[in-house]
Image: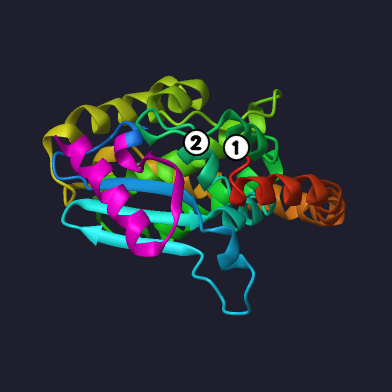
Amino acid sequence: MQKNTIQDKLCELEQANHAKILYAAESGSRAWGFASPDSDYDIRFIFARPATAYLGITPLDDTINIMDRDLDFSGWDIRKTFALLQNGNVAALEWLASPTVYRDCEPSLKNSANALYRPEGALGHYYGLARKTYEKYLRNQEWWNVKKTLYVLRGLFCCMWVEADAACRCPPLDFMTVARSVCDEDRMAIVILLLEAKPREDESWVVNKKDLRHLESFIRDRLEHHREKIRMQTITYSETRQKRIDQQQPTLDRFIAAVILGEV
């Protein structure tokens, strides 16, 4: 029933915004494997407007956002999507890897997006998510929100995956898969404890950080480690990024034009 409601709402969004939704899928905790009973549905999508809409001088909104009860819709224009991918933002790659797809896209869109994955960009992306969440919600707090704690751990585990993965693959979307690949036995015990209880608890569930076996020291150590790693690679990454973007741009421009013109 909920899937039918989401499909209907996607059609409404297309009509209201004069856009074609190229791809739509579930993101957030439901896609990552640690949803609570009251978790929202985070529907993320990529869209394109009619070709003529891109020809004028009037700036176009490159995002569409709407909240309808427990349905959270957020979409990016095709040009914004690929610009962010070029700059290391891997959010769209996670959308395209979601196990719950509401509207699938042509394989060429996924292939073009995946070709832009770079480990150095992913490391900065996941580190930033982990650090911001820790600083805003957990630091200097005695009682930790479990949802935010898992968000921080997911970001750090993905950083650890990126550093260890010689095949240059984007981290798995499933939280348990990436956790098992990077955690020792003690850390996994905490993860399993939280994950087993979370489906029974609501989004406001908190635990005393003292019950998490020195988890904060692990988080702080990993944040410092990844911060230094990113600092060391920033100079090299900055020197090569623009060259790579310049090389990719003609191909990407042709692909995005083809998508907008309906040729893909």
Q: Indicate the quadrant containing the C terminus: top left, top right, bottom left or bottom right.
A: top right
The answer to whether residue 253 is left or right of residue 154 is right
Q: Position of residue 167 (x, y in %)?
A: 70, 23
Q: State whether the magenta stretch is mostly helix, strand or loop.
A: helix
Find numbered disc 2 in the image and state the secondary structure of the residue it sits on.
helix
The residue indicated by pointer 2 is 96
Q: Looking at this rendering, what residue extends furthest in the bottom direction? A: 58
Task: Point out the frontmost of discs 1 and 2.
Answer: 1
User: Does 7 lie within the magenta span?
Assistant: yes
Residues shaded magenta: 1-30
Find numbered disc 1 in the image and state the secondary structure of the residue it sits on.
helix
The crowding category of the residue bearing disc 1, from other C-alpha atoms within 10 Å (few below 14, some 14 to 19, many at least 20), is some
Q: Are marks 1 and 2 in contact (CB under 8 Å)?
A: yes
Q: Name the amino acid type tagged 2.
A: Leu
Who's the residue at 70% across and 47% down the image? 229
The residue indicated by pointer 1 is 109
Who's the residue at 69% across and 41% down the image? 116
Q: Position of residue 27 (x, y in %)?
A: 37, 42
User: Does 185 lie within the magenta span?
Assistant: no
Q: Position of residue 153 (x, y in %)?
A: 42, 41
Inter-mark Cα distance, 1 to 2: 9 Å
On residue 242, which mark appears? Answer: none
